[in-house]
Amino acid sequence: MSKRKFCIIGTDDRSNYIRMMYKDEERRIVGYEDADIIIGPTPFSKDDIKVNGESLECNDIIKVLSNSSKVLYAGSISENMKSKLKKNKVKFFDLLDQENVAILNAIPTAEGAIATAINMTDFTIHGSNCLVLGYGKIGKILSKMLCGFGANVFCEARKKEDIAFIDAMGYNSVSLDKLDEYLSNMDIIFNTVPSMILDSCRLQSLNKKCAIIDLASSPGGVDFSKAKELKINTTWALALPTKVAPYTAAVYLKNTIDELLKKG
């Protein structure tokens, strides 16, 4: 059994499962001041001041980790926080920068997005016009799931290779410069683009029954104030893996942490 001491910070179900898994392995679980391995939540912090879900200050963690052999593992660490960690010579890993975690996390995110859409609407996904904005990891998996539901899937992308791949998959490709031509016919829009794509002007072109599920990280991609003014059914669905499949999400993260620990 490893002599390394672990601290799992976080109060959400995903963090609780990770804590339970390490306890089951009879790892030494201690406070963050005494730990060799500190496992933080995802996202690590929403404001770069406090650790997400905790009263604990990020600076307190940094002070303990600075110029030491201790290691921080967390997810969705902001660029500002990464710079601060590096400046203080903190060894850390952003778990969502690990390609395998990002891909696997897209699965519960896509499932959660569809569940959210079902709860938001009074019509079936089957036969609906569903637009996925962005064709990255989440966009690819979500589009495939929507197709399985029998939706008419439209995918927006910027890169020519993504447009070609969308066409090859049998979906309806939408280039960004043609996006405005499609919006009024959409029943459900899923956004994965973390920049303002559904602005005030575009929101006004939507039909009133359209539902919007924004999956993008901060700052999101929807003008929520305008959407509220227009009474468009909109939600910002963040941290879906933790909400819809915390156990699975915990397994993904723990497996990755263990692999990184083996590598030293």
Image: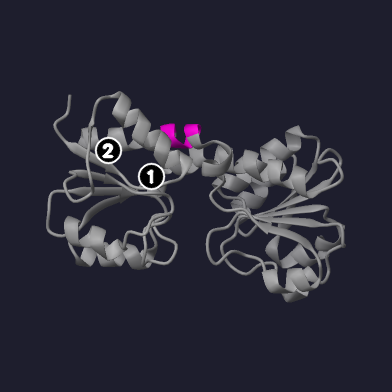
- Residue corresponding to mark 1: 98
Using a 10 Å C-alpha cutoff, classify the residue at mark 2 as few (fewer than 14 neighbours), some (14 to 19) or many (20 or more). Answer: few
The residue closer to the viewer here, 110 or 225, is 225
Q: Amino acid at mark 1?
A: Gln
Residue 124, position as x, y percentages in the image: 84, 40
The residue closer to the viewer here, 18 or 217, is 18
Give left or right: position of 186 versus 94: right
**Residue 44 appears in the picture as rendered:** yes
Q: Amino acid at mark 2?
A: Leu
Q: Which residues are magenta?
A: 247-251
Using a 10 Å C-alpha cutoff, classify the residue at mark 1 as few (fewer than 14 neighbours), some (14 to 19) or many (20 or more). Answer: few
Label 1 sits on a secondary structure element that is loop
- Residue corresponding to mark 2: 260
Q: CB of mark 2 within 8 Å of CB of mark 1?
A: yes
Residue 187, position as x, y percentages in the image: 83, 53
Residue at point 36% right, 59% down? 55
The residue closer to the viewer here, 181 or 30, is 30
Residue 14, position as x, y percentages in the image: 45, 40
**Above/below status of 217 relative to 227:** above
- State yes or no: residue 92 in magenta: no
**Main SS of residues in magenta:** helix
**Residue 264 appears in the picture as rendered:** no
